[in-house]
Image (cartoon, helix red, strand yellow):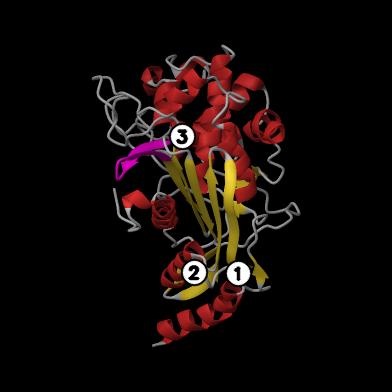
Amino acid sequence: MRTHFLISLVLLLILPKIAQTPGSSSDPVDQYVQFEMQKQHIPGLALLVARDGKIVKAQGYGLANVELQVAVKPETVFQSGSVGKQFTATAVMMLFEEGKIKLDSPITSYFKEAPPSWKQVTVRELLSHTAGFTDYPDNFDFRKDYTEDQLLRVIAGIPLAFPPGTKWSYSNLGYATLGILIHRVTGKFYGDFLQERIFQPLGMSATRVMSEADIIPNRAAGYRLVKGELKNQEWVAPTVNTTADGSLYFSILDLAKWDAALYTEKLLKRSSLEQMWTPAKLNNGQPNSGDYGFGWSIGNVRGHRVLDHGGAWQGFKTHISRYVDDKLTVVVLTNLGDAEPGVITEHVAGMYLPSNGNAATGR
């Protein structure tokens, strides 16, 4: 009974704000999003729908901060989670185009202190999660500050889960290593490289590496449900929030600029983008089981090719889906670690592609 009461109390706080959303009484997209937020107990959500690089809908719902009763708006800044991996992969491909990184060279070319097992690991395998790297171990201390060298030693001390290039297994540590690699090659912290080469040129003014200390305009608070009760996000050490596996702030307005740029060659040649958007092959010549390229998953939803990625970190859950042949992109950013934004992106896409029906179905 207490659990149901607490959820009801939270919703009583949130629903008035949702009800004030412009157009919510008649727009079927708004109605669906509001329904799903109630169902999933999501405090706040930002939705972007873009077609051919132009914004069709950019809308905030619910609360960016429950304690202060601040509403979500298009400018609200959310944590990226692993949606940030596509920016890390783009940076690596920029350096590949410049001849500063070779995709099929062993990563020991860049990490002289690496263990012998890394001699068979390539940059391509790190990008595609086929290197045998694992995730953060159970005993990893997220409340400890690590230097890059210290973090690299932690990663190097974990045995590979399988011979490189033989399987697919999602690895945050692989992308954390890529961030350190970018620093080694350029002499710049990967976040500074992203700022100079991607965010600033595209006018993504709100996007940046996370910082708990800095004053960040329009920053949302992250939440989680504990036995039905809304709680603030768990705290982690500052440097753990700066790794290249997904430690960014961004807004849907900035992601609209990112989406528009991906239709062009402002950042990368078309050949490089196609490499990122094609499932990487294993040593046996077969596509990897994750249907993963570089920083993107490649899938098919009811006959429509989609490039997408989800993210989850510190009380935030995010998802971007690019229906590339239809030139339709849907982004959902939420401030609840228990949310399922991928369900919402797929359903909303169906509402803009009515020939496929409106049901939010799995792949």
Mark toward the start of the polypeptide (3 vs 1): 1
Residue at 64% x, 48% y is 253
Question: Of circles 3 and 2, which is in front?
Answer: 2
Residue at 46% x, 17% y is 103
The residue that disc 1 covers is 21
Q: Measured from the top left, where is residue 174 in percent x and y? A: 45, 33
Q: Secondary structure at mark 2?
A: helix
Do the residues under discs 1 and 2 have CB atoms within 8 angstroms? yes
| Type of amino acid at the residue the image marks with label 2 | Gln
Q: Residues within 10 Å of mark 1 (few under 14, many from 20)?
A: some
Q: Is residue 152 visible?
A: no
Q: Is residue 297 magenta?
A: yes
Q: Nearer the viewer, residue 109 or 214?
A: 214
- Is 317 placed above or below 145 here? below
- Is 218 placed above or below 6 here? above
Q: Is residue 101 visible?
A: yes
Mark-to-mark CA distance, 3 and 1: 33 Å
The quadrant holding residue 20 is bottom right
Mark-to-mark CA distance, 1 and 2: 9 Å
Q: Measured from the top left, where is residue 231 in percent x and y? A: 53, 70
The residue that disc 3 covers is 295
Q: Which mark is residue 34?
A: 2
Q: Is residue 300 magenta?
A: yes
Q: Is residue 175 left or right of residue 147?
A: left
Q: Residues within 10 Å of mark 3 (few under 14, many from 20)?
A: many
Magenta part of the protein: which range? Answer: 296-307
